[in-house]
Amino acid sequence: MTNGLELIVNGKTHWVTAVPETPLLYVLRNDLGLKGPKYGCGQEQCNACKVLVDGQDVPSCKLPIQQVAGLPITTVEGLGSADNPHPLQEAFAAEQAIQCGYCAAGMVIAAQGLLNRTRYPSDDDIRAALADNLCRCGVYERVRRAIKLRIGRPHWNPIYDIITLADPADPATTALPPSIAQTPDLDAWIRINHDETVTIFSGKVEIGQGIKTAVSQIAAEELDIALSRIRIISGDTGQVPDEGLTAGSMSVEVSGRALRVAAAEARHLLLTLAFEELEASDLAALQVNDGVITDPTTGRQISYWKLMGGKRFGRTISGTVPPKDPAAYTLIGQPAPRADVLPKLTGVPSYVHDLDLPGMVHGRVVRPPSYGARLVDVAETAVSQLPGVLAVIHDGSFLAVIAEREEQAIWASESLRANAAWHDDTCLPAPDTLYNHLLTQPAESVLVRKGTAVTDPIPPANPSPTLQASYYRPYQMHGSLGPSAAVAQWQEGQLTVWSHTQGPFILQAALAEALALSPQQVRVIHIEGAGTYGHNGADDAAMDAALLALTLPDRPVSLKWMRDDEHSWEPYGPAMVVKLAATLYDGHITDWNHEVWSYPHMGRPRPMGDNSGLVAAWHRKRPFSRTPQPLFLGNHAGSYRNADPLYDFAHKRVVAHHVANSPLRTSSLRSLGAYANVFAIESFMDELTHAAGADPAAFRLAHLADDRAKAVIEAAANKVGWHSYTPSEGRGLGIAFAQYKNRQCYAAIAVEVAVNRETGAIKLLRAVIAADAGQMVNPDGMSNQLEGGFVQAASWTLAEAVDFAPDGIRSRDWDSYPVLRFDNVPPIETVLINRPHLPFLGVGEATQNPTPAAIANAVFAAVGVRLREIPFTPARVLAALANV
């Protein structure tokens, strides 16, 4: 039945003919084209879907349209537009209160709902009112600041301080950046357009880290043009250079460096052309201002666009043109607002979930109930006759539906699930035996020297250390706020896939192999999704969409996972155990032993013959085997990332034990093994500090030779008031440090906590971050990443663990997988150490790793107990207190 219902949305009346029980979210998005409200969970647990109904903020993902007929409904689009934003949206933009931005519309609506109730909310009011709005990128503190700005009570203190230090210039190198060496054609990187803009091309993709803004700043700086003139194309296998994965905090280092070299070369060529065109006498004397070249001798001018607009350079990049001297920078090192912020805050379609192509239909997949389940029987006929259903796909144990409308696809998939019978051989270990399982499984063991696995014999450990301890990390989720999604279209022998993958070229090859196509038949176009934080289900959703598109040629198919799909089928960050031992002599560490056991971290889909890393490929009638995950012998790879401490110890022994067969599906989660390794190292350093009777900050400094490492520890300690801090009952201050991969960003974190002895709850009171990433590109973007990394790691540390039982995964929604919420996020301050003459370093994973130890060390300072197993739940805190 499709009775017409009156919906009053953003001041306009609409008569809709959807089924009255249809959730409002789908009508807003698919009938009215309002993409601001987002599907996050479908269970009113994350509030990405919030709208105002009669001025009250409510989730729309389960709200039937018949309940709101005739009531005024407002979405973020109704508050304001990107060209004419509402003051609240302007405040969010001023504070740059987004990263991936998937939560942003829900946050703005929740904030406006609060302001409709309370004109001048306190900080506690804000935290309480938005406690149910989830943000996995961790911008809660910036959201709080934005709301305070909106009510005219802003925080006058900046969220970050900058310390600029003079260093000797980085030694010049004649080696081309790897990306340029692989793709040396200048036209592959830069295009001068007729419309007085410049297009740059990057193989790295935007996943909320602000990479588009950063590389645009770099290119605009070298070209001497305004940032507003830069256009960027990224992550399209049909248009951009292959720069591999967007991972490992390498985007600015890799693509930024490549574009810096390419832009310097382009500027030099343009100056050379202008020298001839202007009949100048001195090439070196020519001046450039926003793309206009002037000969100061004659006053004659010519622009880049007059010289090259629409033309090709037709040159190979030589790498011999020196980039600009940092002393002349006007854009690099300055805060630059991201161009995508206001559009995302005002509901402009920005994500693959928002893509709306002509003739598009909607799909859903019905996954097996657990890893070992196989389809025995399914009653397809009843489902195929449901309203709007276009196709039911049954290929082995792969089940899916395609329907005209999104809610029809969801309802049909629920019916298909109810009509399917499965045989289940799943037998996972009991959760309380997880770490014993990890430690007793066959393992490939290697010695690690200077961060690199070597094949040398493993020497015995010191049999009589002064101190030893073990540390534990569970399986943990990426837990993207927006479930994985893709759109695919099969047309005239060509498959086009729009995906939020982190590796468009790798996905292109994996899809081609799994679908028996040539790579030339597959084009992958990156479109943003919710933050992924590593290898989540994005690539799997692309495979799902491709299979559905092949079933229904010509029509684009939008495929979205449901929340339980995301929670139960994404590849998790693997469980790990770290065992440490050390010897103290005269207050110094003389011997260090580090052993780490871990399931695999490298499960991304790659062409592998009869194996595949794509879930759907495992379930088809002619299945691929799961991709084996052997030990990867690289530098700071997988489980042994940051296992080799940066500290100067007389003797180090680092051993990695790779356990290939994980009971749960695993792959790369933000920072890989570094999170567990640094948690163990920095917690153990604190234990050794206590044994030596030393100060934690001074003890670390005494074991470091690296001046940059010392500088971040001293900066964090000074900012937090380390030397003047006096602990009180139940309150304490902790510190921790790491350099990511021992070669990227340096970060030190100080955290103050309060521990409730009665409940075991840990309250985060304050966090200070000090970081050194060489030459800063965008300090605000850098601080935002550092803040978000801390918040996400704090969530892992205090709350997150995948719950499972022998028959399968139990964590299937946000209630069964708790995460850190707005009400336990502290004020965060950052100190950015800028070194203009040193290379760019990525910061996306720098704070992920010191965070758990900083919290653990603060807990010890507060109540005298050591927490060695993540997460630090109230029950674990109470158990530790009971043993004191």
Image (cartoon, rainbow, N blue to C red):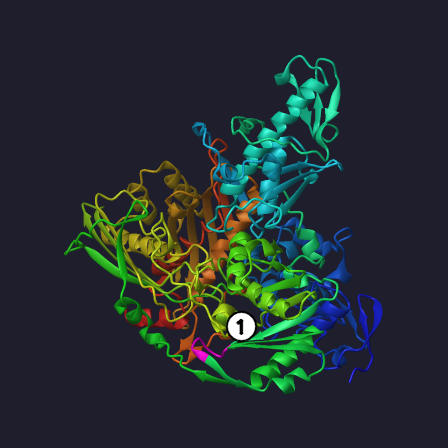
Q: In which quarter of the image is the C terminus?
A: bottom left
Q: Residue at x 44, y 44 (%)?
A: 745
Q: Residue at x 57, y 34 (%)?
A: 262
Q: Mark 1 points at which residue?
A: 565
Residue 455 position within the rendered picture, expressed as x and y whole percent measured from the top left: 25, 50
Q: As rendered, which of 456 and 598 lies closer to the eye?
A: 456
Q: Quadrant of residue 289?
A: top right
Is residue 189 visible in the rendered structure shown here? no
Q: What element carries label 1?
A: helix
Residue 351 position within the rendered picture, expressed as x and y whole percent measured from the top left: 65, 59
Q: In which quarter of the image is the N terminus?
A: bottom right
Label 1 is placed on what type of residue?
Asp
Total marks placed: 1
Residue 256 position within the rendered picture, expressed as x and y whole percent measured from the top left: 54, 40
Residue 529 position within the rendered picture, expressed as x and y whole percent measured from the top left: 60, 59
Image: magenta residue range: 368-373
Query: From the viewer's perspective, is residue 184 above or below residue 524?
Result: above
User: Main SS type for the magenta part?
Assistant: loop
Tell me: 578 left or right of 293.
left
